[in-house]
Image: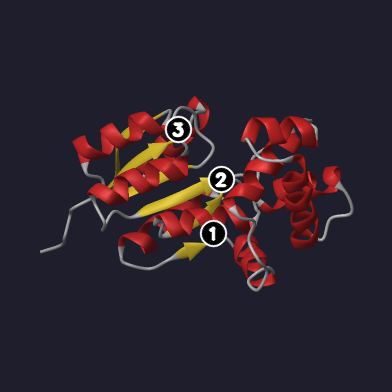
Amino acid sequence: MLNTKKIRILAVDDHPLLREGIAKVVNGEEDMQLVGDAANGRQVVELFRRHRPDITLMALQIPEVSGVEAILAIRKECPIARIIALTTCSGEALARRAFKAGVTGYLLKNIPPTELLEAIRAVHFGQRKISPEIATQLVEHCCEDALSERELDVLKRVAVGSSNKLVAAQLAITEGTVKAHMKNILLKLDASDRTHAVIIAIQRGFLVA
């Protein structure tokens, strides 16, 4: 007798059109069923508890609770949860955080529907799926030092135009410490100046534009 059990899927994205597109693609398959969709990270944790899906398709740039934070919350309650990250960011830094949080797949949103369906089936049966562009980035930067949490705090404030003096006040550290952090950031990112560092950090996924 054939196994007719469907792969139950939860979709998370703050763009209604994308959620509708995923629903149409998924529900058009005989072996899949969309059991719910969420527009933010807080909703997805609640819906996961309710539906216990086989696969969660998780956008990473979502409001209220970030995708990475939602992944951590889900995996804390259900360590065997299978989650595929969907993102527009091709940088390896965000991918590293997502994999560390517990995703099994990492895909760019511009992939064809057939590739998404293939990834869902593969992850459901215990495989990992990652977009080639992301894999290339991970390999290229595998031996480089990641930015520390404090360096990220500094760079986030620099990205919105804060001076060293203001960053120091905001983080309750000295201006000299901020300058030291910026020197390390420039070295790690191989950036020529503050603006260049911010651009590289966005491209690689340390910062979200």
Looking at the rendered structure, the kind of residue marked 3 is: Arg
Give left or right: position of 19 versus 48: right
Residue 170 shows in the view: yes
Secondary structure type for disc 3: helix
Residue 6, disc? none
Residue on which the image places disc 3: 19
Residue depicted at x 65% and y 53% = 90
Q: Nearer the viewer, residue 18 or 152?
A: 152
Residue topped by disc 2: 87
Mark in the foreground, 3 or 2: 2
Q: Position of residue 171 (x, y in %)?
A: 63, 36
**CA–CA distance between discs 3 and 2?**
13 Å
Q: 136 or 93: nearer the eye?
A: 93
User: Mark 3 or mark 2: which comes first in sequence?
Assistant: 3
Upstream in sequence: badge 3 or badge 1:
3
Res 115 visible = no
Q: Nearer the viewer, mark 3 or mark 1?
A: 1
Tag on residue 96? 1
Dot 3 alpha-carbon crowd within 10 angstroms: few under 14, some 14 to 19, many 20 or more: many
Q: Quadrant of residue 51?
A: top left
